[in-house]
Image (tube, rainbow, N blue to C red):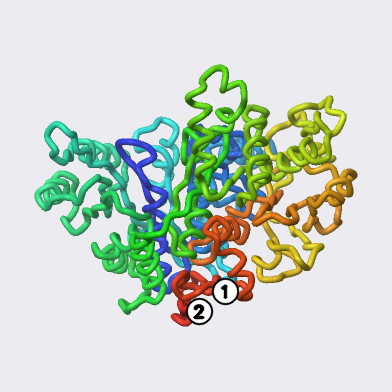
Amino acid sequence: MKYILVTGGVISGIGKGIIASSVGTILKSCGLHVTAIKIDPYINIDAGTFSPYEHGEVFVLDDGGEVDLDLGNYERFLDIRLIRDNNITTGKIYQSVINKERKGDYLGKTVQVVPHITDAIQEWVMKQATISVDEDGVEPQVCVIELGGTVGDIESMPFIEAFRQFQFKVKRENFCNIHVSLIPQPNTTGEQKTKPTQNSVRELRGLGLSADLIVCRCTTPLETSVKEKISMFCHVEPTQVICVHDVSSIYRVPLLLEDQGVVRYLCERLNLPIEMRPRKMFTKWKEMADRSDRLLEHVSIALVGKYTKLADSYTSVIKALEHSALAINHKLEVKYIDSADLETTTLQDDPVKYHEAWQKLCSAHGVLVPGGFGARGTEGKMEAISWARKQNKPFLGVCLGMQLAVCEFARSVLGWEDANSTEFNPESKHPVVIDMPEHNPGQMGGTMRLGKRRTIFSSSTSVLRKLYGDVEYVDERHRHRFEVNPELKHHFEQKGLQFVGQDVEGERMEVIELEDHCYYVGVQYHPEFTSRPIKPSPPYFGLLLASAGKLQSYLAKGCRLSPRDTYSDHSGSSSPDMDMRELKFLSL
């Protein structure tokens, strides 16, 4: 097993996740099996109870693990399926050590950070690195480990110490460290500054780890003199200083690393068993990057949510929209709208903000209401849903978005004026959305309906079913505490709102579709978590097709796009052995 540790310096949020994913991608394209681990030094057991404003969205895995959004990057880049133990937190480590201590596993010993905590970290990494993440069940050969935060943070010290010991345990030829650092360029001089990187690398070396590759994040390509300066002061060869400047698309990052000889260096440094041959998977990445730069036609989607001040709150949603837009050859424009700005209270308090929000909504080609929690902004979301329904605008509601679409329909069409979710109004006479029997209101963490669940299509004419390839069922990831009240189902169906998908028992409403509408779909699950660059998520793909005015022709052609609109037949695998035939162009 080869281990590649990715650390960060100077600032957090520097792009370690994309760098780690890109390193994994170029190694996977060489035919290696790659897994990934993300370490978060916070004391929370998992990311499930965070506000999206803390660390961005909460990503959900097949097994129901609520984890950091970087695991979403790993899954999308590497096309792998991770589990909750691929995300290590300080809370998980301490909890496992304390549980062992209570059971008497350390009998007679004083339990300390060194060696007990550091040993637990190393054991967890070694155990998790061997678990297969590919569909073929093959044990990984390379494990990319991303250490969250920045070097020098007090909470990440036990992890740094664990890896200092780890490098000797697994031997030098099986362990290397990639350090990601910032090269600031002040506007006053325009000069690229190396001092923060020098200090960061010096601190890392002081803690017992030496950087094998220094990845420099900068706005413009690194000047040769700057590269040589970093090489001289940071104890590495100039070829070990890698520049990752700002690029037009994240698909370009693996290409940047490849162009600067990262694969060649890792091959020599870790004795990797790969041949330096042209790689099919890389052709796919290059084509995606080139296509995203060449797009001329635009499609705009209004994202109506409550966490719109931070784009990371909706990372997977934005990626799912991008994958779908790329598949139909359109450039995506996302119009972020704070749902509270659409409410009549804003009209009195701040009329300019109110009219700007409505102008954004009315000028968009399609409307998306993503998941969320809490009552703030829900009335605004229902206003947006109502407008999309009445104006025959393409609409997709995800999780809470689907529940609110049911509430809006109950109020506007069924005439139940106080229809609501018991989450927002427990006293409602028409509780169209209710909490699930297994929901435990006394404990917040991990008490939702989480992870991969099966949805059975009950209608053969469902648009979404056709978009999924006319399958009988789909397996998608869930994250919710509330559900549509199944006892009221018949009231909606009589008026044209069809529940076309239910769970295996037929008790949970999973998919809604409105009759005689261009595209009005709500899903209880989160399809964005399984969207891939070459295989867009069908609900989002349908939204983009409808927004670009291409859905009907796509369905009429048996769910096929014209050659001008596609580079893939939507079955493109990201496996290392992906055949070039999967990049074929489809005929009209």
Disc 2: which residue: 586
Labelled pair 1, 2 in contact (Cβ < 8 Å): yes
Q: Residue at x 16, y 46 (%)?
A: 230
Type of residue at label 2?
Answer: Leu
Disc 1: which residue: 560
Q: Name the element at disc 1.
A: loop
Q: Nearer the viewer, residue 570 or 228?
A: 570
Indicate the position of residue 114 as horizontal and vertical percent values: 46, 37
Task: Look at the image and tell me in which quarter the N terminus lies.
Answer: bottom left
* Direction from residue 420 to residue 27 in the image, left or right: left
Type of residue at label 1?
Answer: Arg
Indicate the position of residue 34 as horizontal and vertical percent values: 47, 64
Q: Name the element at disc 2.
A: loop
Q: Nearer the viewer, residue 158 or 373?
A: 373
Instruction: Of the two numbered discs 1 and 2 on the same chain, state the one appearing first in sequence.
Output: 1
* Direction from residue 548 to residue 160 in the image, left or right: left
| Name of the residue lying farthest toward the front | 391
